[in-house]
Image (tube, rainbow, N blue to C red):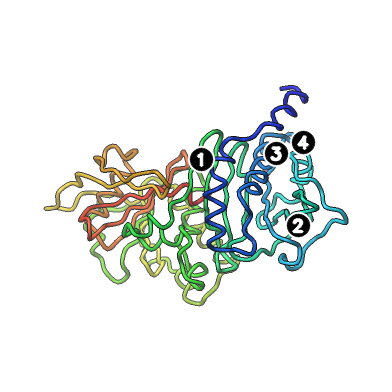
């Protein structure tokens, strides 16, 4: 595409930006009234980020995070002498300097226009953020109440498609606590205590696909739903992660421990982890417990506005990993199963006492 034709395209509106702007504006108005951008501002920022994401700087796609806040709300920050224009050219040029995680370009009103005033690592809770994940893929998110941990996603825009997270609707669906954490409903101290979130991100990052079974501590009941012998049974249980969690450690050692367990999920079979975070086995094959029926139906939910839950046969879930995880939770109803697919999909399986069936939550939109 010629430079001239690309510039012509950038003058066009990116339709999903207008489609989501009002809903997103209402979300931020409810949670952060003093910093909430209006719909027009949101549309303008999304448009600039989208067109920038399709450009190249030295052959690389820009990875940037734009935060809407004034400099005085940003703590220690790098300020430019004169605000820079919010346009794809400026964003593409700045991208190499701010592509590392945790750095945000600050955007605010400047004489009736939006301008980039600098960069910061410090933003308040519920600050509006747009991140370019890859060309044509944007995530609208905000920081949770805790300064640590992953941001809560509000909407995902990819090409001409968009998804708005249905946090409230999913919250009342009897979803597992882990899904609640992904939705951003955990309390102020809960995010830093979440172990499954970094494990899930690590599972998804290695790209091989994998399964993680979380079982109650202090019981061997889970063994009844596993085919024995397990090629990689762990004895004694590997307790490094559990010890770090118990001691409140959340530094590089914690990341190394979660990444190590995440890496084990790349081995064919499932990792079995106690809810005290001890590794009990990996490469485990799930089998049907004697005397228990095969799971017949699974209720699938995606926490997205407009997506209605639907019931399907477990064979339609997406492969052996998904079927096995559903069967395991069907038998071990006090357990949780996390399944990452090679294509980036991520499903959380939990038992619903109210519906008396396995629920499968498709949560990849919450992990971006």
Q: Nearer the viewer, residue 359 or 287?
A: 359
Residue 52's tag is 3
| Nearer-N-terminus badge (1/2) | 2
Q: Nearer the viewer, residue 124 or 34?
A: 34
| Nearer-N-terminus badge (2/4) | 4
Q: CA distance from mark 1 to mark 3?
A: 18 Å
Image point (27%, 63%), residue name: 334
Image point (38%, 53%), residue name: 338
Question: Dot 4 surroundings within 10 Å: few (below 14), some, or many (20 or more)?
Answer: few
Residue under label 2, please give it: 119
Secondary structure under tag 3 reads helix
Image point (50%, 77%), residue name: 247
Question: Dot 1 surroundings within 10 Å: few (below 14), some, or many (20 or more)?
Answer: some
Q: Nearer the viewer, residue 4 or 194?
A: 4
Q: CA distance from mark 1 to mark 4?
A: 29 Å
Residue 343 x %, y %: 46, 38
Q: CA distance from mark 4 to mark 3?
A: 14 Å
Is the residue under label 3 in contact with that under label 1 (CB below 8 Å)? Answer: no
| Nearer-N-terminus badge (2/3) | 3
Residue 318 x %, y %: 34, 38
Residue under label 1, please give it: 162
Secondary structure under tag 1 reads strand
| Nearer-N-terminus badge (4/3) | 3
Is the residue under label 2 in contact with that under label 1 (CB below 8 Å)? Answer: no
Q: CA distance from mark 1 to mark 2?
A: 28 Å
Residue under label 4, please give it: 58
Image point (62%, 52%), residue name: 38
């Amino acid at each position: 595409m010629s430079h001239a034709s690309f510039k012509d395209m950038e003058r066009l509106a990116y339709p999903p930006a207008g489609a989501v702007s009002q809903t997103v504006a209402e979300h931020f108005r409810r949670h952060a009234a003093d910093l909430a951008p209006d719909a027009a501002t949101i549309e303008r920022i999304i448009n600039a980020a989208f067109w920038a994401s399709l450009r190249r700087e030295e052959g690389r796609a820009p990875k940037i995070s734009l935060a809407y806040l004034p400099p005085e709300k940003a703590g220690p920050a790098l300020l430019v002498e004169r605000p820079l224009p919010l346009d794809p050219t400026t964003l593409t040029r700045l991208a190499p300097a701010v592509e590392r995680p945790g750095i945000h370009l600050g955007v605010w009103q400047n004489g009736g226009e939006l301008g980039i005033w600098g960069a910061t690592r410090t933003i308040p809770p519920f600050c509006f953020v747009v991140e370019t994940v890859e060309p044509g893929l944007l995530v609208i998110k905000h920081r949770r109440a805790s300064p640590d941990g992953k941001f809560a996603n509000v909407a995902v825009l990819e090409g001409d498609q968009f998804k708005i997270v249905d946090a409230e609707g999913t919250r009342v669906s009897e979803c597992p606590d882990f899904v609640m954490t992904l939705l951003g409903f955990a309390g102020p101290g809960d995010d830093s205590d979440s172990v499954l979130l970094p494990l899930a991100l690590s599972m998804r990052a290695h790209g091989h696909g994998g399964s993680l079974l979380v079982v109650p501590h202090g019981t061997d009941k889970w063994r009844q739903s596993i085919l024995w012998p397990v090629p990689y049974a762990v004895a004694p249980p590997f307790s490094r992660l559990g010890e770090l969690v118990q001691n409140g450690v959340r530094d590089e050692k914690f990341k190394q421990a979660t990444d190590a367990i995440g890496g084990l999920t790349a081995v064919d079979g499932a990792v079995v982890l106690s809810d005290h975070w001890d590794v009990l086995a990996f490469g485990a094959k799930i089998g049907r417990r004697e005397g228990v029926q095969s799971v017949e139906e699974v209720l699938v939910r995606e926490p997205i506005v407009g997506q209605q839950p639907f019931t399907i046969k477990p064979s339609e879930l997406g492969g052996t990993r998904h079927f096995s995880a559903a069967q395991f939770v069907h038998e071990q109803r006090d357990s949780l199963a996390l399944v990452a697919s090679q294509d980036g999909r991520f499903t959380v399986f939990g038992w619903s006492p109210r519906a008396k069936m396995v629920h499968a939550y498709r949560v990849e939109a919450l992990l971006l």
